[in-house]
């Protein structure tokens, strides 16, 4: 982009002429691009082109998983209705002293064993998720505070 150094009046070094106006227009087109070069079917309306692009972006949302097992997480098997392998998963725990305080722990389920850490009230909880299969996983919590499993979510794309 070629820079135009504009100056206030009474300076006469900034002439408003076709050369400078054409240069200004060219700089805008070069840096922003032309609407007709957008990768959309709407080439005449910027808002329409943006909306068309937004409609093609996949909707991402967290989905709750139905599960069963001992919420205490003391080396128990958690059975799920969804295969969580190769998914981004959020285990939502609650503190034993406060059923309203939620502690999310998010991780990508790609390994047979996942070592996770959560903090609550300055205390540390260690969480081990292992023996992961299409129908569930083993869950162990230990540390300064023992968290109880409340919900399981996965990212649905």
Image (tube, rainbow, N blue to C red):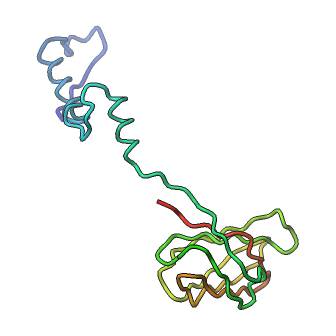
- Residue at point 82%, 62% (across, down): 100
Residue 141 lies, with reference to residue 152, above or below; the image says: below
Q: Give the x, y percent position of residue 145.
A: 80, 81
As rendered, which of 50 and 12 lies closer to the eye? Answer: 50
Q: Among all residues in the image, which is located at the extreme top?
A: 10
In this image, 105 relative to 24: left or right?
right
In this image, 145 relative to 59: left or right?
right
As rendered, which of 68 and 142 lies closer to the eye? Answer: 68
Residue 154 lies, with reference to residue 5, above or below; the image says: below
In this image, 15 relative to 123: left or right?
left
Q: In what quadrant of the picture does the N terminus appear?
A: top left
- Residue at point 81%, 72% (across, down): 95
Residue 104 lies, with reference to residue 40, above or below; the image says: below
As rendered, which of 42 and 27 lies closer to the eye? Answer: 42
- Residue at point 27%, 31% (across, down): 42
Which image quarter: residue 138? bottom right
Q: Among all residues in the image, which is located at the extreme left?
A: 19
In this image, 111 relative to 3: left or right?
right
Q: Give the x, y percent position of residue 57.
A: 40, 49
Q: Give the x, y percent position of residue 6.
A: 26, 21
Q: Give the x, y percent position of residue 11.
A: 25, 12
- Residue at point 77%, 78% (across, down): 147
Which image quarter: residue 66? bottom right
Q: How many numbered discs, if any? A: 0
Q: Among all residues in the image, which is located at the extreme right?
A: 97
Residue 19 lies, with reference to residue 42, above or below; the image says: above
As rendered, which of 75 and 8 lies closer to the eye? Answer: 75
């Amino acid at each position: 982009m070629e820079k135009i150094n504009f100056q206030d009046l009474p300076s006469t070094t900034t002439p408003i002429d076709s050369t400078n106006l054409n240069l200004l227009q060219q700089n805008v087109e070069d840096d922003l691009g032309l609407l007709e070069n957008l990768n959309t079917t709407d080439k005449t309306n910027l808002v329409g082109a943006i909306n068309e692009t937004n409609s093609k972006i996949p909707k991402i949302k967290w989905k709750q998983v139905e599960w069963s097992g001992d919420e205490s997480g003391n080396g128990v098997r958690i059975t799920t209705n969804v295969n969580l392998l190769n998914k981004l998963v959020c285990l939502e725990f609650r503190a034993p002293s406060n059923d309203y305080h939620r502690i999310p722990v998010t991780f990508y389920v790609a390994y047979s064993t996942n070592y996770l850490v959560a903090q609550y009230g300055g205390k540390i909880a260690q969480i081990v998720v292992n023996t992961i299969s299409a129908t569930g996983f083993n869950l162990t919590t230990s540390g300064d505070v023992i968290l109880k499993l409340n919900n399981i979510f996965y990212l649905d794309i």
